[in-house]
Image: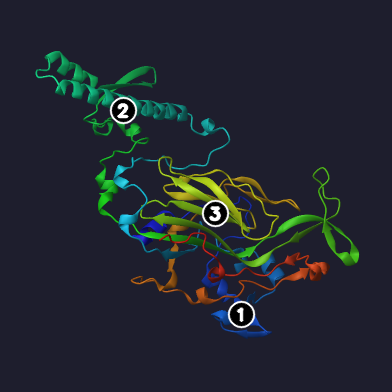
Amino acid sequence: TVEALVKQWAPLVWLAPNEKYMPGDVSKFLEHDSAVSLDLLFDLPIGNESKNWYLVTNSDIDELITRKESFIHGQNPLNENVPIYAVVSMCKHSPSEMSHKPDQKRPQFKRNPYAPTPKNIFELQPNLRQTINKVEKSIRLIRKKRELEESIKLHDETVHNTDLPSKQSAEDLTVGRRVFINSDEGNGKQNFNSNTDNSIENTPRSEENEEWETITERRHDTERYGDEASHDFPHFHVTYWMFYPYSQGKVMCTIDLGPFGPWPIPLIFGMCLGTKKEFGSHVGDWEHMSLYFRGRKEPDEMYVSAHDAGAFYSYERLTGTFEYHSQETRKGILQQPTFPKTVVTSSNHPVLFAAEGSHGLWTAPGKHKFVRVPRLYDINGFGMPWSTWRNVQIIYENGAQGRSSLQPKWMKFNGRWGNPKTKCHPLKRIGLHICELTDGPTGIPRKKHHFKCKA
């Protein structure tokens, strides 16, 4: 069940339209890198002894960037099943102590498939207004049914106190239990009638009912959902790790101050009056997002990481979206990004957008400022879709009992996944850590969890 949920909710990641550095397979990356420490070459070290080690490219990095077919450019997810690495942490729980209501008491629904939309959504879907009208009518229907049920309940109590209810009262009661819906289709009108004892979902199947089922799910569709009350869904949190062989830095406008090195300057009317330099590139790049499952078939929370910051979202079952509720800055004080409020899903898969070059994850397309001084932006959009669930390599943390998958050897490497920093600013000794090529990032074992199992 854990494996099924992990794959079912793996993200859909849109790579940027002009992306040059694609995601990659860790095993292929390791074929072109060597572990380096004290100028000596060894096989991949593991454990605490590997903390000060670097995975260094066997070839010159500038040469690799120039060759478009080199491993540093990653793999096209449309042509190859690029893996995503899902690290699962199981939680101990007592079913009787669950803080959530049973799933059978929650309304079922069916969401329309996700599709990229322009600013004017009605240009892409001319019939959307008609669909919205149906949704609004369904809401009014539900409210009216509730009002009728309350009045019927009150009427039943009144009739119960009467020894011989009249025939007219019984007829009125039957009529009162019927609900009519008017729906405009084309140039004509169609009427649908239902009864509170036989819900809309059980009316005869017609062409209109087929359209209706794109909005509301049949509550008794056991073939699709089964009997949820009989299942005990696991408690766990999972972090989806995406690996890129190379992360491209940001281009900044600078002025050369001689012995004091280059300093960033602002653009003047959108033009750089100095020299453009690229800073912050590095070999190896780990990006991630996390989900927390608490005994349901849907996650309760999601965490999305962008550089050294991240945002927490709560899942809304009725809308099938994740809603923002807080954020954090894990490192530094200059990163104060503004995260979008809502994350949509596509067949349960959270839809995320990887920034061009740097691959930071965002929950909406566009231009996102993540550093105030100097102003640094991430740009993303609908470039190439990466359906990560096609190749999910599940790794259980702490050797979960009864789990078949074994941790790969590289999960025990605690060093840095890339070359050491080079071409740094002359004033790095006084704390100005600006380099054209920065250190490779640390790997999964040295990352902290964003969710903790609750007792």
**By what rule are the colours in the image chosen?**
rainbow
Q: Mark 3 vs mark 1: give the one in front.
A: 3
Q: CA distance from mark 3 to mark 1?
A: 30 Å
Image position of 343 (left or right of 59): left
Assign a secondary structure to mark 3.
strand
| Residue sitting at x 52%, y 60% | 450
**Residue at label 3?**
304
- In the image, taking residue 362 as reference, residue 389 lies left or right, namely left
Residue 363 position in % (x across, y down): 55, 48
In three-dimensional space, the C-alpha distance between marks 2 and 3, rounded to whole angstroms, equals: 39 Å
User: Residue 217: x and y, percent?
Assistant: 32, 38
Q: Which mark is residue 146?
A: 2
Residue 233 vertical position relative to residue 407 in the rendered view, above or below: above
- Residue drawn at (49%, 59%) of the image: 451
Within 10 Å of disc 1 (Cα), the crowding (few <14, some 14-19, many 20+) is many
Q: Amino acid at mark 1?
A: Ala
Q: Disc 3 marks which amino acid? A: Val
Q: Choose mark 2 or mark 3, whichever is in front.
A: 2
Q: Please state which of residues 347 and 25 is positioned toward the viewer in this rendering.
A: 347
Amino acid type for the residue under numbered disc 2: Arg
Local packing at callout 3 (Cα closer than 10 Å; few below 14, some 14-19, many 20+) is many
Report the Cα–Cα distance between label 1 and label 2.
Answer: 68 Å
Q: Which mark is residue 91?
A: none
User: Circle 1 is placed at which residue position?
Assistant: 35
